[in-house]
Structures are given as structure tokens and as C-alpha cells.
Image: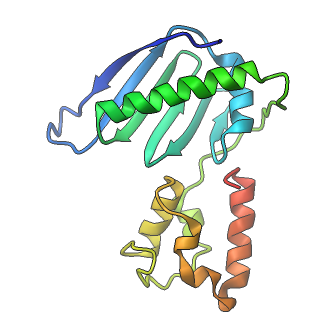
Amino acid sequence: MLLRDYTVNVIVPRCNPRAQTVSVIADLSDDIIEVMPYLNAAIKGCAYQPEAGVLRFYREGAAIDVRSAAITVTRVESEARAREILESLKELINTTYDRRDELDPSYEARNELKAIEVLRHLPGTNCKHCGAPSCFVFAARFVRREAKLEDCTPLFSPGHSQRKQKLLDLLRSAGYI
């Protein structure tokens, strides 16, 4: 076991006390820097900056930054939900650390996938079949893991096979698939 415990600090925006989301910073009891390359290999679609020691990804719309001594979870609906996410991350960190002999670490730096990059490969119909008011909103939701690619039904029609292929290539290179 690498990570024994953490302490949670809840942050409510002072500029907007009625905010719909909260953020938390968990100060870790143990330094987890040695597991970061293994997490980079295990977590699909994460952005990893090894020189800065930061791993960033989204889970259910929450933005998560993992550093050697702290984890930040932002844009989460409640403190209770943030604590659930932190517990699952603690389990992921410890499981990954325990299995590190079976895993190939990845030191590859990857930048965060941007919604505009996804948007460039969508059909651009703003059809709303996906439930979003526009293709850009869909792309933003997709990057935050709040939507699935299959939700964009026009992308899977015969006339958009090249767009779909280019988007799939982009997602592979970003580690999403």
C-alpha cells in the first residue's frame, strides 16, 4: 500500500456562495510520485506532464489533478461525491502500485484534449440528437466524459466516415481509446 490516508479541504467559491459545485484538495499522507507513470498507463485519456508531476483527467464531469502530494477534484456536485471520488482514487493508486510489476509505465507526456479539437471532426450539424444544444457543447461534454461518442448519431452515418476515422485517430493519440 502506497497511499495510507489524506486530509480533505473543501473550497467553496467566495465570489459565488450559491455555486452549484464544490472543489476539494486532498493533502496526501504519502508521496505518490513513483506510481504516476503507471497511472498514466492505466488511466485512459489523461493528460500527463512528467516534468511538472501532474496527471489530469475527468471522471463523471469532475476535473481531477493528481500530484505527488495532493489530489484536487473540481466541478463536483457535493462534498460527499468528492469524498467518494477520492476513495476510488486512493484504491486505484494503491491497486496500481501493488500491480506495478505487471504493468508497463508510461513516461509519455500528453496534453489535455480540448473540445475544439473534437469539434473539428464532428459533423457540425448542431442537430441536438445527442441531447446537447450544439456540437461544441457536445464536444465539451465528451472531453469531460459526460457524453459518449455514440451519442453523435450523424457521425456514424455513411457520409461522415472520414470525420469519424480522423476523430478516432485523435482519440487514440490522446489516450481516450
Q: Nearer the viewer, residue 2 or 48?
A: 2
| Residue that appears at 79% across and 34% down | 106
53 to the left or right of 14: right
Q: Nearer the viewer, residue 157 or 33?
A: 157
Q: Is residue 25 above or below residue 168?
A: above
| Residue that appears at 55% across and 23% down | 90
The image quarter in which residue 80 lies: top left
Q: Is residue 110 above or below residue 169?
A: above
The image quarter in which residue 103 lies: top right
Give residue 112's position: percent from left, percent from top: 59, 47
Q: Say which quadrant the N terminus sits in.
A: top right
Give residue 16's position: percent from left, percent from top: 17, 40
Give residue 41's position: percent from left, percent from top: 74, 37
Q: Say which quadrant the C terminus sits in.
A: bottom right
| Residue that appears at 74% across and 28% down | 37
Q: Is residue 164 above or below residue 154?
A: above
61 to the left or right of 153: left
Q: Seen from this angle, which residue lies furthest left? A: 18
| Residue that appears at 50% across and 65% down | 139
Give residue 148's position: percent from left, percent from top: 54, 64
Residue 53 visible somewhere in the drawing: no
Instruction: State how the image is colored.
Output: rainbow
The image quarter in which residue 164 lies: bottom right
